[in-house]
Image (cartoon, helix red, strand yellow):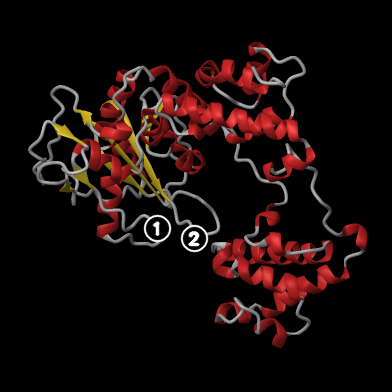
Amino acid sequence: MTDESPLRRRTAQRPAGSEPHHPLAQPPASDVVGSDSPPGGPVALTAPRDGTPAPVADDDALAEAVARFAAGSGPVAIDAERASGYRYTQRAYLVQLRRAGAGTALIDPLPLPELGTLDAAIADAEWVLHAASQDLPCLADVGLRPRRLFDTELAARLAGYERVGLAALTEALLGFSLEKHHSAADWSTRPLPESWLTYAALDVELLVELRDVLALELERQGKQQWAAEEFAALVAWGSQPTRVRPEPWRRTSGIHRVRGARAQARVRALWQARDDVAARRDSAPGRVLPDSAVIAAAELDPRDERALLALPGFNGRSVRRLARIWLDALDIARALPDDALPTTPPVDGPPPPHRWAERDPAAAARLARCREVVIRTAAANLLPPENLIAPDSVRRLAWTPPEEITDESVAATLQGFGARTWQVSLIVAELSAALRDPPQ
C-alpha cells in the first residue's frame, strides 16, 4: 500500500500511449492530468469525435447497429437516460453505447422495447457503466444484462477520489470537461432535440478511456481484487427481479410528522389515490400531488372542497381538478374500522442509535468502538467508510454480536449481511476486538 493518496494529489498517470486525443479539442499540455489546476485548464468537449448519430428507431437500423457492435472489440461503454421526476416508471428512454470499431449508437427503446439481439452481440464483452446501480434495472427491462462490468464511479470510490461524478472524473483524469445540464431533462420527449442527443453521446464518449485510467490506479494501489468482487456483486444484483418495497406509502416525505393510526390511514389512502392517477397518466407521482400536500391533508383531514383547496399544495389547476378524488380517499380512511388501520411495522434491525445509550449502554459502547475501527481502517486504505462496510451491518453487529466472539463468527455474521471477502479480511480482526465487553 502506497502512502501517496489520490485524496491529496487527485492526479493519475495516463497509460502509456493513451494520451487523450479528440479531433474537436486539444488536450492540456501536460503529462499528468487531474490536478486541481492543469496547465491550460480542462478542454470542453462539446461534440463526439465521430459526430452525433441519429437514434436507432427501427428494426433495420437496430440490425445494423447489432452487426457493428458484434464486430467491434474491447469493452462496451453503456449509459441510459430516464425521465425521473416526469414519468411514472423508471424505464429507459434512450440507451447509449460505444465500442472500439463500432462507434457510438443511440438506441430509442420506445419503438424497440426488446433489445435481446444487441444483448447477445455484446454478451462476452466487459460493460463499462458509471454508477451502474442506477441504470442496471432499466437496462434489464429492455433485455440488456451484463455478464461482466466495470463501474467507473465505484472504481473511483475504491481508489479514494473525493469527486466521483462522471464530469469531475473526466476532467480530473482525462483533461476534458463535460456539460451535464441535460441530466435532469424529460427524456420521454419526442423528437429528442439534437443538443440532447449530443449530450447523450458524450456520456459514453470517454467511458472506456476513463475505465483504463482507473484500472491502472486500482492496480497501483493493489485493489484490483476488491473491485472485481464489487463488480461481480453488481452483476448478480442486476440479474435479480426488481424488488418492490413493502408499504411504500410509509416513505412519503414528512410522514414522521403524522401522528396516530387514523392519520396514517389518510396518508395511505391519499398515496394510493395519487399512485393510481400517476400510473394512469404515466406521470411522476410528485407531479400529480406533492408529498407536502399529502401530509397536510393527512394532518388536518379537510371535509369539503373549500377546506381541501385551502391547504398548501392543492392550489395548482390540475390538483384542483382532482379534488373529488382526494376527498374520496379521505372519506375511505375516515370510514375504516379500527382493526383496518395501519399498525406499527415490525422493527427489522436495531433501534435508532440515539436510543442505545438508555436502552443498552453496552451496545452503545460497542457501536462507538466499531465506528472508530471503521473510520480508522477506511482512512488507512483510502476508502469512504461506507464502501469499507455498510453502516447498517455495523449497527446490527454492535447491537447483537455473535454469542461467541471470534474472528470466524464475526466474519460469518458480516458475510450474512452481504459483506464481501475483501471487506471482511480488512476489518474482521479489529471489529472482533471492539465487540468484546470489556474491549481488548
In x, y percent, where is residue 113?
46, 46
**Is 44 placed left or right of 340 in the picture?**
left
Q: Amino acid at mark 1?
A: Ala
Vertical relation: 416 (above or below) 243: above
With 62 as the anchor, is 139 left or right in this view?
right
Crowd around label 1: few <14 · some 14–19 · many ≥20 (10 Å): few
- Residue 397 % position (x, y): 68, 27
Q: Which mark, residue 184?
A: 1
Front-lying residue, 71 or 277: 277
Side of 361 relative to 428 (left or right):
right
> Is the C terminus in the top left, top right, bottom left or bottom right quadrant?
top right
Residue found at x 31% / y 46%: 106
Q: Label 2 amino acid?
A: Gly
Please give the residue where the numbered disc 2 appears in the rendered image: 85
Q: Is residue 225 left or right of residue 373?
A: left
Considering depth in this image, is 360 or 239 the residue closer to the camera? Answer: 360
What residue is shown at x 73% (from left), y 70% (from top)?
Answer: 298
Which residue lies at the image location 13% right of the left edge and 30% below the top edge? Answer: 19
